[in-house]
Structure formats: C-alpha cells, structure tokens
Amino acid sequence: MIFSIYGKAMSVLVRKPFVLWGISLLQLFLAGAAWTLFGIIPGVALCLGWLLSTSMTLIFLHGYRGNKVNVLMLFDCFRDWSTIKRVLCGMGWMNLWIFLWFLVPVVGWIFALIRVYRYRLTPYILMQEPNVAPTDAIKLSRQRTEGWKGRMFGADVLIVVAVYVIVLILGLLARIRYIGALFGIILFLFAISCFAFLPLFIGLVRAAFYEEIKAEANGSSRCPACGTYVHARSAFCQNCGAPLSGTPHAEASTVPTPDVAEPEPSVVPAEAAVEEVFQDLQESGNDAPGEAGPIVEAAEEAIEEVEQTVEESAADAEQALKDAEDAASEMLDEFPSEN
C-alpha cells in the first residue's frame, strides 16, 4: 500500500515538478511575508498561514488527480468570506484540540502526535465536502482515519529514515580520500533536491492517502490492473481503461449469444429413413405398380416437405445468429460512452 502510494505520488511529481515547486515557493514566500508584516499581531499571520496551507493542500490534491494546477489556485481559500470563515473555523478548531492534548504532562506530545494523524483529513474535508460543518470536519476525519493512522505514520517515518540513511552513507563516502570530493558534491546536490522537492512529494503522498481513504469510505472498488479506486458501478477504469469485473456494466459487457434453435438432429435420420422406404416402395412398385403407385407419390411429397422444413430451419437459424451479433455489437458500443 505505502509503496504503491509512493509510486503514484512520484509519477505526478515527475510530470509537474517545476509547476508545483514554483507554487510551493510562492506559498512559503507569502507565509513568511505575512509573519513579517503582521508579526506584532500573531493571530492575523496565523490565519493567513492556515488559508495558504489549506490552498496548497488542495493544489496537491488536484495535482495528484491529474488536473491542471496554476498559481491562482493558491488563493482559492480567499475567494469569498464564507470560504475564509469556514477554513479558519475548521483549522482553528483542529489546532486548538491538538494544542490542548499537547498540554497533558509528560505524554502530551504523544497524544498530540496521534491527533495530528487523526485530524489530517480536515483541510481536505473543509474544501471538498461543503456539506460538512467546519467543527464536524475533525469528527469525520477521526472516523475515516480509523485503521489508517499507522499507515500514514509509517509513510512519513519511512521517508525520514530513507533520507537520513542516504545522507549518512553519502557523508561517510565523502570522507574517503581522493574520491570523497565526488560524493561530497553528490551529497550537496541531494540536500538541495530534498529541500526543493521533498515537501512536494510529502504533500502528494498525503493527498494520495486522502483519496484512498475516501474511496474506501464510499465503498469504491479497486482496479485489478493499476490499483486505482473507481466507482463501484463503473464498467471501466478511468485511469487505465481496463474492464472491471463484478460490476453490473462489466457483467453486461460480455453479452451472451442467445440460444438459437438449430435443426432437430432427428430430421436428417428421418429423411434417410423416408428415402430408404421410398427405395423399397420403388422396388415393390416395379412389381406391383398399381398398388404401390399412390404410396410412392405420397413418399415423394413427404420427402419434399422434409427438405423444405430443413431449408427454412437453416435460414431462420442463420438470421437469428446475425440478429444476435448485431445486438451484441450495439450493446458493447454503448458501454464506454457511459463512463
């Protein structure tokens, strides 16, 4: 699960590295400017920081979904007073509870850390689910993160450990004579890359967790080909286009060919039997034409009727098969358009 999320986040970061980096840099600059200008009024600077961070969270979510992102999205939380009030109330309520748990003696930091992961979905809920009240966002986040807090914590710890191990190894290699300078340059470039792109990667990983958790809460199914969550009634994956099994549309996509009535197997043997009788009658008719003549004529008429019945049955079967193939083609053409 964690490495699958890493892979998806990295694929998004590779496609949009500089766009996300530029927007993130602007967000840091604006947050720093807010603290510089309104440092004497900490509440104002703090509120501006919450609005900017929530907008940046939404940008990571749009980027992870494959949507186009731009600088103007950094001001989505400032678009109207109701949005500003909603974000400030929700984020303020969340941080207040984290701070209160932190005040618990000795083990307060542990309780606060647990609340950080328990309330991690709050900014996403505030911006993506307007029907949820701002103060109820942390309750919904707490419900949805049940069973996911350990995975999110593990994903964050794994990133920190990986960076620490790489820095340690490069630092040791940099102490080797003659070739140490080369590893020192690699270590310097790695540190710059981490400073520039690691926050972006972490933001995309958190957005990926929100998508996974929300999809699980909505009862969505996972694509067996690429692992993406799709709607439970979807026939095809919107990410890779693979058909999904176990859905109504997917089951209907395999249109069974209707059973077509085939000529009865007994028709051919019956025709052979009539032919044999006819030959016998002919032989007997040569001996007694007066008596066998009417019987021979009746036998000839019976053979003609059998042949006509067989031809009509074959024509009907061929037409039924053609109609079934046309119906199946029309039904299959309609399924992709429903997605």
Image (cartoon, rainbow, N blue to C red):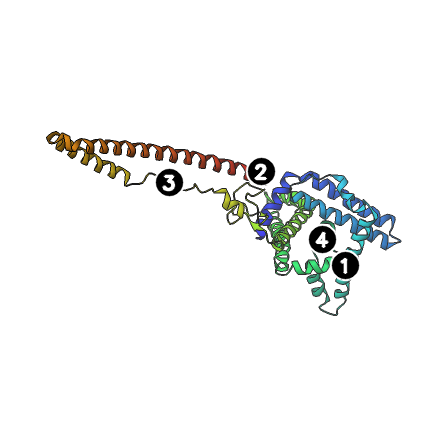
Of discs 1 and 3, which sits in the foreground?
3
Q: What residue is at 87 percent from the left and 50 percent from the top?
A: 38
Q: Which residue is mark 2?
A: 337
Count residues near mark 3 (Cα–Cα under 10 Å), then give few for <14, some for 14-19, many for 20+: few
The type of residue carrying mark 2 is Ser
Contact? badges 1 and 3 (CB < 8 Å) = no
Contact? badges 2 and 1 (CB < 8 Å) = no
Secondary element at tag 3: loop
Q: What residue is at 73 percent from the left and 57 percent from the top?
A: 137
Question: x and y percent of residue 151 in the render?
Answer: 61, 57
Q: Is residue 333 visible?
A: yes
What distance separates the C-alpha of mark 1 from that of mark 3?
66 Å
What distance separates the C-alpha of mark 1 from that of mark 4?
11 Å
Contact? badges 2 and 4 (CB < 8 Å) = no
Of discs 4 and 3, which sits in the foreground?
3
Question: x and y percent of residue 327 in the render?
Answer: 48, 37
Q: Which residue is mark 3?
A: 261
Q: Which residue is mark 1?
A: 135
Contact? badges 1 and 4 (CB < 8 Å) = no
